[in-house]
């Protein structure tokens, strides 16, 4: 027997088993409708879960991107200061992030696919549930229990196959989402532990930025000193001299703070 | 004849298309038996494509059961084996 035939027989057997549950076939209709609505709720929840998961992965991707950009800037800065060793260190850390980022992108694409599939499944089920509800009312109004049986079988087998399909789709999406969640959790932990952002944490600062800052303040001092020695100091004084008269005119009281005293 | 692709929906196919589908289906089945994942993926996607392009999609609100049911496009060998096992993947 062919593969497709075998699968369809298994689905039918499941539907028959479900149909045997009620004594009065018309009760089966109501029972089934109730289960359809439950499944519809479950699919919608499934869509929301997958979307949440996808957003989380997107957020992590954005975080990693930010860190990676920062490392690139650090590498450029380090290189411009002649510190190839520091630039190399920054780029090494960046390459570790890059593989994480491409992994996240693949996950995001997969979740996006699941989300789309489930959304379509929920639309199909919604349409079928609606049409089942209409048929159910017609069958209940027009037929006796005995007559209704065949009609019910027809409506029921169609919807129960869809329910089996959608139920399976939700299950698969849940399994995949759970796997993604576990991996996303691992990346969160990695970020929290500082293994990834040690070099690039925005708030805390890191060894590379500290070194770059130390170097840059050192070089600021050096260049200012050099400027003073070269006699460009009078020019700086000239510039600041042009402001006090204006201030004096505007405010007769003496200024408590002078700009040039700051740096 | 109505064919369902799990996770995608249902299509009506004509009797003339059946021999082609049966040949492709036999290839999928052989791959399942040989436990050959890559051959399975290729033959399954050929079979699903034949249904999608050759068949006419059934409207969403139709309540007809299918004569043939096919695994989802991203199914693994393992999943198909479970599908063929009565207590397997299908809930309820």
Image (cartoon, coloured by chain):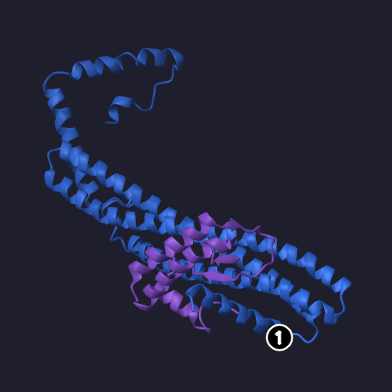
**Residue under the image location 45 percent in, 75 percent down:** B80
Question: Measured from the top left, where is residue A72 in percent x and y?
Answer: 25, 44
User: Residue beneath label 1, please?
Assistant: A20
Question: Measured from the top left, where is residue A260 in percent x and y?
Answer: 29, 25
Q: Does residue A246 sit above or below A33 in this rendering?
A: above
Neighbours of disc 1 within 10 Å: few (<14), some (14-19), many (20+): few
Q: Colour of chain B?
A: purple
Q: Chain of mark 1?
A: A
Q: Does residue A259 sit above or below A197 in this rendering?
A: above
Compared across the picture, whether A140 is left or right of B78 comes to: right
Task: Pick the quarter of the image with the C terminus of chain A.
Answer: top left
Question: Measured from the top left, where is residue A195 in percent x and y?
Answer: 28, 61
**Residue under the image location 12 percent in, 47 percent down:** A85
Is residue A203 visible to the viewer in this orientation of the structure?
no
Label 1 sits on a secondary structure element that is: loop
**Residue under the image location 83 percent in, 71 percent down:** A139
Compared across the picture, whether B37 is left or right of A229 comes to: right
Compared across the picture, whether A100 is left or right of A30 comes to: left
Q: Does residue B28 sit above or below A74 in this rendering?
A: below
**Residue under the image location 55 percent in, 77 percent down:** B90
Question: Measured from the top left, where is residue B78 in percent x and y?
Answer: 41, 76
Is residue A20 visible to the viewer in this orientation of the structure?
yes
Q: Colour of chain A?
A: blue
């Amino acid at each position: 027997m062919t593969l497709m035939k075998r699968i369809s027989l298994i689905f039918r057997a499941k539907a028959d088993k479900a149909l045997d549950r009620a004594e009065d076939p018309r009760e089966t209709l109501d029972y089934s409708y109730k289960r359809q609505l439950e499944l519809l709720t479950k699919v919608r929840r499934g869509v929301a879960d997958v979307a949440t998961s996808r957003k989380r992965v997107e957020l992590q991707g954005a975080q990693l991107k930010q860190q990676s950009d920062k490392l690139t800037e650090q590498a450029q800065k380090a290189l411009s200061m002649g510190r190839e060793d520091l630039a190399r260190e920054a780029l090494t850390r960046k390459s570790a992030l890059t593989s994480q980022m491409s992994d996240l992108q693949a996950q995001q694409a997969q979740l996006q696919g699941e989300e789309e599939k489930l959304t379509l499944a929920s639309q199909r089920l919604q349409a079928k549930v609606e049409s089942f509800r209409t048929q159910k009312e017609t069958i209940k109004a027009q037929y006796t229990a005995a007559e209704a049986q065949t009609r019910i079988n027809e409506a029921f087998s169609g919807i129960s196959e869809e329910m089996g399909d959608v139920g399976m789709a939700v299950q698969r999406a849940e399994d995949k989402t759970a796997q993604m969640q576990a991996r996303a959790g691992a990346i969160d932990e990695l970020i929290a532990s500082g293994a990834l952002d040690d070099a690039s944490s925005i708030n805390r600062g890191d060894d590379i930025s500290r070194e770059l800052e130390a170097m840059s303040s050192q070089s600021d001092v050096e260049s200012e000193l050099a400027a003073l020695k070269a006699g460009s100091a009078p020019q700086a004084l000239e510039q600041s001299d042009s402001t006090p008269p204006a201030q004096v005119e505007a405010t007769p009281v003496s200024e408590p703070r002078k700009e040039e005293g700051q740096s | 004849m109505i064919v369902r692709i799990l996770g995608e929906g249902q299509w009506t196919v004509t009797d003339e298309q059946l021999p082609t589908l049966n040949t492709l289906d036999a290839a999928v089945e052989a791959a399942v038996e040989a436990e050959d994942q890559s051959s399975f993926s290729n033959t399954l996607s050929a079979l699903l494509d034949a249904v999608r392009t050759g068949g006419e999609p059934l409207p969403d609100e139709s309540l007809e059961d299918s004569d043939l049911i096919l695994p989802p496009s991203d199914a693994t060998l393992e999943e198909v084996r479970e599908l063929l096992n009565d207590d397997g993947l299908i809930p309820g």
